[in-house]
Image (spheres, rainbow, N blue to C red):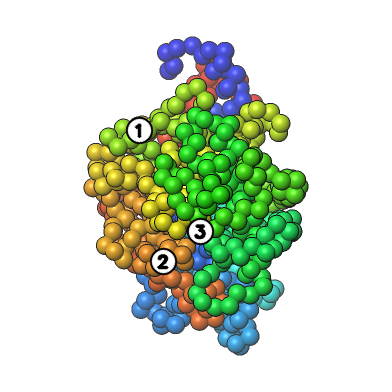
Amino acid sequence: MREEPFSPQDIRYLNLLRKQYRTIQEASAEVAHLRAVLRLPKGTEHFLSDLHGEHAAFLHILHNASGVIKRKINDLYKDILSTHERDMLSTLIYYPDEKLALLKKQKVVCEEWYRLTIYRLVEVCRVCSVKYTRKRVRDAMPKEMGALIEELLLSDGTPDKEGYYREVMQSILETGQADAMIIALSRVIQTLAIDRLHIIGDIFDRGPRADLIMDALENYHQVDVQWGNHDIAWMGAAALSEACIAQVIVTSVKYGNLETLEVGYGISLRPLSTLAMTCYGDDPCEAFLPRDNGEELQDDEMELARMHKAAAILQFKLEGQLLERHPEYGMESRRLLHRIDFANRTVEVGGTVYPLRSCSFPTVDPADPYALTPLEREVMDRLVLEFAHSEKLQRHVQFLYSAGGMYLRCNGNLLYHGCIPMEEDGSFAPIPVSAKSCLSGRVAIDAADQLARQGYFAKLGQQQRQTGQDFLWYLGSGPNSPLFGKSKMATFERYFIADKAAHAEVKNAYYDYQNDEETALRILREFDLSDSGFIINGHVPVKLSKGESPIKAGGKLLVIDGGLSRAYQPVTGIAGYTLIFTSHELNLVAHQPFESTASAISSEQDIHSVQSLVKQMPHRLLIADTDDGDALRERIDDLMALIEAYRSGVIKEARG
């Protein structure tokens, strides 16, 4: 019996709960169900980072669950099916629509093939579903096929029901539903193979179609995103920060990757092209050329170089204006346009004077170097409208805000993209989240998260919105940004200064402490996590080819940027990592390069993945051991209070 009386607030809450559980019997049944759920094995979590627009490789990894589905098929059928048959079944699960069409064209499909294939898919689905409740499995099924799939999954092979299930299968074939059943089963398998997906930042830039990755993520059954520095630039651009818009365009043009902007988000760069031709039509733009391999430049490559330079000068001007508004950022040294000596063709950077490779700045007025020309202002205004009216971009960024954040505490682990900024002595460094005060550690990163949201959701025209917009830019480029983690972004220097000493970007002291176990434990404690947890980090590619290990700090810090982006693969020696956290163990899966979706479908070319054990759990983890378990226990306590309120007469049961 309850010792303390129910407070008015308790009664208000329990009356709301009464609408769901109208009687003692209903509430008691739910308590029994939730207590049983606590005894189920923990769901499988997959962690990936630094996708960088590589949509084809990422989607394949998602479809094959980082090799998990192939391993389950091999376990089931290694002594029954040939390697080719197992590969065909795997590919059918990954790409059911496309593979079915190809097999039909190859005359492989017949009634017996359908019968065997559906039977095998049901077996694979049954293996993937064993750790879930029936409701969870049912929720993964399409409504129109759910009842049939459930019947097939519940088949126990007993003689009493053999005729029943044989008739179910025959009906599927005779009514022309075999293709739909194969497609539905394949998607259920994909859904059940990964319980929860964590993306540790940097979905955008470099690769061709970040928007297609975002399409997949916003429709995924359970996913979260820890923002990366490249993501935050796009978020700032969608928030209509002019500095972020310029930065996004520069990065896109620099890598010759305009598909995400123009095709994915429908943002026209014609205004920029007009500016480039008008102001830089006779400019050789040497430092802005898309390549320098001795080949003759094509007209479109020269146009791209001019657009690149036009956008870069816009970026330097807008960033200069922003930094003048925010002396608290401590980045006055990054305002470089007014440090150019046009007569002597030099620039002063960090107290050193460097000769310029080029002194062609046709839109820069030495008397007011950060002012936009009338044409630049017109172009910027049109670009702001393009970003504001891109419905798909705005929808994707709203998803990043709702499903993402600066960090995540999940099942005892700490997930973040970049770093926890530190001083050289290992103390937490201040982050300029306010013009009046600097905070450090978790409280600062929480404040940074709030400011980033303010930059998008505060009303346009209000100071709150401007402050938040500017801070979004800082998060992508600032020296003490948790997402950036370097002293500066030496973009101007790489374009205009030949001396590579000026190009140096010093990493935050955090990276000097990455192999220090005590520092990792101190970070975990800062976020109220126990020493048994792990830090899961992205951002900096692991140079596996040079002997670097992704497992650092005595095993407490796992860096999972393995180079899914093709640009980093020569450095990493692999093509990405997936960290997989099951109820039994923590595994790191290293992927080899992905050839193409077409090869995967036609030739059953899968990504070769090698799995290595990070940690064996001391006992099998249950839902009771997870954050979901904590939430379920709270729900059980609430329901027990409701039952007690019913029994004591404080609240009456609802009937009918």
Q: Is residue 149 above or below residue 324?
A: below
Residue 357 rendering spot, x and y as whole percentages: 50, 58
**Dot 3 lies on which element?**
loop
Residue at figure coordinates x 41%, y 66% from the top left: 569
Instruction: Tell me if label 1 and label 3 are in contact, CB under 8 Å.
Output: no
Is there CB contact under 8 Å for labels 1 and 2?
Answer: no
First reached walking from the N terminus: tag 1 or tag 3: 3
Q: Which residue is mark 1?
A: 428
| Residue 357 badge | 3
**Inter-mark Cα distance, 2 to 3:** 31 Å
Which three-letter amino acid code belongs to the residue tagged 3? Arg
Say which quarter of the image contains residue 466.
top right
Residue 634: x, y in percent?
Answer: 46, 30
Circle 1 or circle 3, nearest the eye: 3
Depth check, front residue: 533 or 436: 436
Task: Find numbered disc 2 in the image and state the secondary structure of the residue it sits on.
Answer: helix
Kindly tell me whether residue 164 is visible in this rendering: no
Residue found at x 41% / y 45%: 352
Q: Amino acid at mark 2?
A: Gln
Amino acid type for the residue under numbered disc 1: Phe
The foreground one among 104 and 13 is 104
Determine the residue positioned at 70% across, 73% down: 175
Q: Position of residue 27 (x, y in %)?
A: 53, 31
Crowdedness of circle 3 by 10 Å Cα count: few (<14), some, many (20+)?
Answer: some
Q: Nearer the viewer, residue 493 or 171?
A: 493
105 horizontally vs 119: left or right: right
Q: Which residue is mark 2?
A: 569
In the rendered structure, the answer to whether residue 117 lies left or right of residue 283 reads left
Which circle's residue, 1 or 2, is located before the other in the chain? 1
- Marks 1 and 3, how far apart at CA: 39 Å
